[in-house]
Amino acid sequence: MAESPTATQERLRVVGRRLPRHDARDKVLARTLYAADWQMPGMLEGAVLRSSYPAARITRIDTSRAAAYPGVAAVLTARDVPHNILWTDVPGQTSIVGPLRARVQVLADDRVRYQGEAIALVAAETREIAARALELIDVAYEVRPGVFTTEEALRPEAPRVHEESNLLATWRVRCGDADEALARAHVVVEQTYRCGLIDHAYLEPEAGVAWIDADGVVVVRASTQVIEHFRDVADVLGLPHNKVRVIGPYVGGGFGGKEDVTVEVFLGLLAYRTGRPVRMVWSRQESLLARPKRHPFTLRYRTGAARDGTLVAHRIELTADAGAYAYLSALVLLYATVTAAGPYRVPHVAVDARAVYTNNPPTSAMRGFGAMQMVLGYESQIDQIARRLGLDPVEVRRRNALGRGDRLPVGQELDTHVAVAEAAERAWAALGPPRPPSSPRHRVGRGLACNLQPYGRLVWLRDWASAWVGLEADGSVAVRTGVPDVGGGQASSLCQIAAEALGVEPDRVTVHIADSALTPLAGTTTATRQLYMSGNAVLVAATHLRDEVRRVAAQILETPVEQVTLADGAAVAASHRSVPLGDVVKECARLGVPRSHLGVYHAPAGDPVDLERGGGRVFPDYTFGAHAVEVEVDVDTGAASVRRLVACHDVGRAINPQSVEGQVQGGAVMGLGYGLMEEIVVDRGVNLTTSFASYLIPSALDVPDVEPILIESGDGKGPFAARGIGEPPIGPPAAAIANAIEDAVGVRITDLPITPEKIARALGLLSGG
Amino acid sequence: MPAAPFDYEAPATLAEALDLLGERGPEARPLAGGQSLVPLLTLRLARPRLVVDLDRLHELRAVRRTPDALEIGALVRHRALERGEGPLALCPLLQEAAALIGNTRVRTLGTLGGSVAHADPAAELPAVLRALDGAVVLRSTRGERVVGAGDFFVGMLTTALAPDELLTAVRLPLPSPGAGFAVEEFSRRAGDFAVVAAVAVVELDGGAVARARVALAGVGPVPARLDRLEAALLGERSGPDAIRRAVADRPLGIEPDGDIHASAEYRRHLAAVLTTRALERAAEAARGAVV
């Protein structure tokens, strides 16, 4: 197990600087070639036929009219797919359900399990012809009874979504004796919360182009968070893994929605069948209809506290709607289970969690991955305990906050700095003196919410990342690593890290990313792991290279190696004599000293943990934070608007504070939308929200300027002690808003999104149902 | 997905445009600012064979003042209404209503005629037209007719326009100089169509209501006038208490449907709140105007 490498140079020159990202200018000038922008000679356009029904048997598919339509190059159904299964393995599932090998059919064979499930593929000369061909495919359905709520799905007589039980996964935690502790608690708060089905709503819908290259390799250039899906494409096509290559261009937003396979396998099938380049671009409606979304949860909490506000117990029951296919549901549920007690010391905790198949849209990864849904539960609970006991909301959190050395209910000891109390205090203090409401018909309230979010993958996945760093003869630097850049500044941060280690300006570093054939694999841009993992890999490689270069420079400068530093593109001796880096590289070449290095970083690894027995380490580490909001409520309409949002997180160290603040602001805005307006509405399996006119995401006018506060504790497991910040900021806003609304108008909203109508109803403004 | 293929014509004169609609009206759709039609095209909810682009018809951008009304060309953009350009300043109600439409980009392109002809039940301008007892001028090769707002809006996204007719202008009677007005709107998200919007115009005689008009958007297939409430307010004092009582004392006579953004019950509640607020503000403005 490798410890996090750290730079030995005493003063940081590049890390910590607010730098404009190297990719920003091209994006603003529309020069970036996103997945859909790629053009090739003879390129066909691909399209997907999708199920009209959420639960049906397909009795017949007739593609003959579509195949005969002029300009159609291929029509594929399930029987044309060599291996019609995508697998999701969930190692270490310790429950009555057992280890999970979850299946997703590439194209529906004889059953469809959700509205929008893919049934057939078309490749045609134009999009127009492809669209026409889809209309010419004749599918006969026999509509079957479906299950559309988790309650329905768990009834013994319920129709089964798959052959096996509708209960997809369960996890349990037992720490102490929650029931006994609740019986003795001074105050017990019991409440059920619900959070809704959420879409990623990225700017860039799913898209890509595939072709067969001159060596017979199937190349897929697609918008993805995971270039390792080359293996899935190969498995479906029945090709060796080394005959498929995935190239990841800059991604216009992923948020977990491009973690599972999207267009890659469809494109591979169509290109392989036609031998021609094929492009596929999903429409917004298609994206909203058919992509896996964030799990809705029902969270039932019983929480007990002592008279002074000290938490003594949680009994928590979680039910997640997994939709029609497993995808990553079992893992999402695990994240929820591990974090359900929040960033607090709670001696007695019992968690029972389950994920259930329904005929709703499938659910899988989305920013926060199960952990973010829990914040509404534990932060609403602690707020109500404070209110019940007449305690200050900051004080009750400070009293219970986790610290270094404390253990989570699953037994993991926290071995880095834990900034929960500090974040809560700083965010709350930043709100400043109260401001008056904007009219006599408005009330103002404030709310606070803390959270924890893992960064890095489960330790028993034995995560690793690799990166190649090389010096050119002119002293410029090349970094090669298989990192998909999803817009969070992933590539740009690596640039800063390499520049720091090698003593050059960032504009002397070029980062080549995300090509499964040409860049060393670095793993997925998911799970708040990419800066942590690939950043460490780049630092390993660059630090190794730096030491080689310093050794050669010491000979040139005729000085002890310990006295050589790399700075400003040169090797510098203590005497201030220096030699340009390029000259040192040329000397390395002459001496046969390697001018490149492949760095590999292995995250802390471990065996699967039995959560129920409290086994130990589950994740490498966690990021902690707190948000404070000021909300104004219109007491006649119930409308709530957020006037202030202060978001504070311990990021260990900010590699590029500007990028980190961008992540915090973007995450907080997404969390605000989740809290107040976003909801995929599904009526008996039929999605009613397949456009941005009906699926409401906040506009710039609906959010205040998010005020980020970065705590740099100097403690974390990433490069230069950084902690991951991709997911954490989405967690707190919804709960902070719910807490602020109770502060403003005295009603507790427990269902997301917190619509004006729900507030109006809670205020008694509406007569009945 | 781009729009389904269609023919495109951009006539240089109104006469040419009317000829085109006369020949191919049932399969044609006129394009003004494109803020309603273009989304319908790209969503393929509208698949016209011919799009007639009106952008070159400068004659439809004119605003004329008659002794007691404004005649506003159909192609006058929301942004001009919002700014109160030229004679439009005579009807500040238009400024307040137009400022609530979409966002700056929508208002820069969208047109008065386009909004009225599209007849979205939640749109602001049809409600303004209804509140001010306005009318629309419809032209075709067969001639011209003027239709009152009450008869023009027929149903959800449906109007009295015949397939060969073009809406060329909107006529708005100017409120008396002492009239007060207000628009109150509730939407789920900034810049969206209203869930419910209320337009109120109040004229006073002494301290009492001489005439009150209220139109609502978002509570049915067409903009609604609240005749019974208007009648009940006649002769009442104009203070907030009297208005609140008048609104609370009787059903508004609306039958909204529920949808994913608001239940029918919540829309009825919003209608009452926004009607009250709009009337209060309009009455206050009228009192200020008299002083």
Image: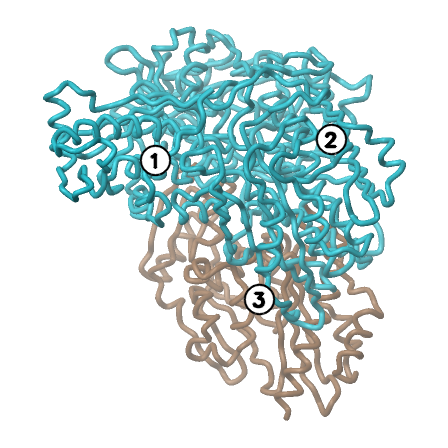
Q: Is residue B78 left or right of residue A103?
A: left
Does mark 3 fall on the same chain as mark 2?
no
Q: Which mark is residue A318?
A: 2
State the SS at label 2: strand
Q: Disc 3 marks which residue?
A: B147
Q: Residue at x 50, y 81 (%)?
A: B90
| Residue type at numbered disc 1 | Thr
Above-or-below relation of A177 to B29: above
Q: Which mark is residue A8?
A: 1
C-alpha gap between disc 2 and disc 3: 60 Å
State the SS at label 3: strand
| Residue type at numbered disc 3 | Val
User: How is the model colour-coded?
Assistant: by chain
Indicate the chain on which mark 2 is placed: A
Residue A688 x %, y %: 63, 38
Residue A589 x %, y %: 13, 22
Q: Are marks 1 and 2 in contact (CB under 8 Å)?
A: no
Q: Residue at x 56, y 29 (%)?
A: A365
C-alpha gap between disc 3 and disc 1: 82 Å
Front tag of 3 and 1: 1
Could one spot residue B119 in this view of the protein? no
State the SS at label 1: loop
Could one spot residue A733 in this view of the protein? yes
Choose top left, top right, bottom left or bottom right for residue B58: bottom left
Which shade of the palette goes to chain B?
brown
